Amino acid sequence: MKVTEHIKRAKKTLFSIEILPPLKGKSIQSIFDGIDPLMEFKPSFVDVTYHREEYIYKKREGGYLEKVSTRKRPGTVGICAAIINRYKVDAVPHIICGGFSREETENALIDLHFLGIDNVLALRGDSIKSEPAFVPEPNGHKYASDLVKQIVKMNKGQYLEEDLETVAPTSFCIGVAGYPEKHFEAANMTSDLKYLKQKVAAGAEFIVTQMFFDNAKYFEFVKKCRDMDINVPIIPGLKILTTKNQSNVLPKTFKIDIPHELHDQVEKCKTDSEAREAGIEWCIQQSKELIKFGVPCLHFYTMGTSEATRRVASKVF
Ligand code: FAD
């Protein structure tokens, strides 16, 4: 079912999660072990992230370094199929511009359509580590809004090959990313929102936010979106802080702030397990306030561990 349909039918705030494919070579059992304990909270959908290739240098005989392309976390599509099959829950694959030509995107979407997948989260993706800025693939998309446009065309039965005789339109419900604390490349919040509005105008039907730890930032973001006539559901993305180190690493990685109250609390913790308790308690309070505000869904970034999400969900659902 489409995410928008889940939201329309819901009588209370929905619960959903995002998971990462396991590292290459690891078993899919780790995915099931992460989802199993969360099934009692009836997730409406499970997002599965997409990870593009990276370049690593391998030392070869004679001491020279060979640049090798590798994908550390392949398997997004297979995991989506496995989730649907095992849990009968909607899976939402992330699909990115980076590393994909338009043809490759079309073929990937055909696979997803044949699997009966109703939703995709359309993203640009980050630059690869060896590149200072995002470089689109030759004949690929530069911005997520262009990817949204391609998916919308396929929903209308317009494939890249114009002379196909009969075409089966896809019917993807398209989500996009939003940034309560601004995307790090955007010159300012207003320009970022202008481009977010372009994604919605192109056909995106829901927004999932980057993680945030200060609800005031989300409330302000929603207000600014509504003031700019961005009227689709805005699903808050929540990450539970689970180690002391995360209070410094998350801002660097995701370009977000940790509120000083939370940072102070974590700094006082002597161990990771104390920091984790503080993180869980913070997220419980955040979730309760968001539910009171009337958010359509609480979307948890599990990042490979589900115990903290289970603890929060058991207090708020
Ligand atoms: P866009 O919407 O294309 O925006 C990128 C930047 O360009 C912004 O600064 C925007 O303001 C600007 N911009 C947009 N349109 C224009 C335009 N027409 N002209 C000029 N500037 C413009 N990454 C992955 O690789 N895999 C994942 O699975 C993944 N999942 C994610 C899930 C969520 C919920 C979020 C919030 C992020 C996720 N990301 C993922 C990270 C994401 O790919 C990066 O944040 C990326 O840098 C931006 O993606 P976007 O779709 O927001 O890009």
Image (cartoon, grey):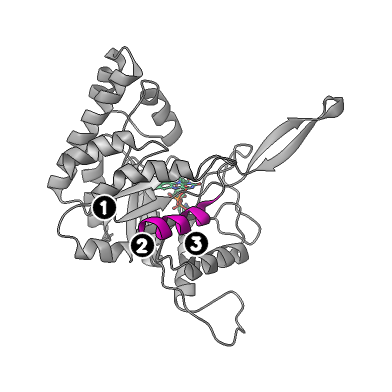
Nearest to the eye among marks 2 and 1: give it: 1
The amino acid at mark 1 is Lys
Residue at image position (26%, 52%) is: 42
* Pointer 3 or 1: first along the chain: 1
Q: Position of residue 13 (x, y in %)?
A: 19, 52
Is residue 225 visible to us here? Answer: yes
Going by the numbered disc 3, the residue's amino acid type is Leu
Mark 2 vs 1, N-terminal side: 1
Q: Which residue is mark 1?
A: 42
Say if the magenta span includes residue 85: yes
- Residue named by callout 2: 200
In the depicted structure, whether residue 301 falls above or below residue 174: above
Please state, as top left, top right, bottom left or bottom right, where the C terminus lies in the image: top left
| Residue 231 found in image quarter | bottom left
Cα–Cα gap, marks 2 and 1: 28 Å
Q: Which residues are magenta?
A: 75-87
Residue 185 can be seen, yes or no: no
Cα distance between the residues tagged 3 and 1: 30 Å
As helix, strand or loop, the secondary structure at mark 2 comes to helix
Of residues 48 and 106, the one nearer the viewer is: 48
Residue 264, image quadrant: top left
In the rendered view, tell whether residue 2 sits above or below residue 98.
below
Q: Nearer the viewer, mark 3 or mark 1?
A: 1
Give the percent coordinates (x, y) of residue 169. Answer: 47, 78
Residue drawn at 23 percent across, 23 percent down: 261
Mark 3 sits near ligand 1, with its Cβ under 8 Å away: yes
Looking at the picture, how far across and down is residue 161, in whole percent?
A: 62, 77
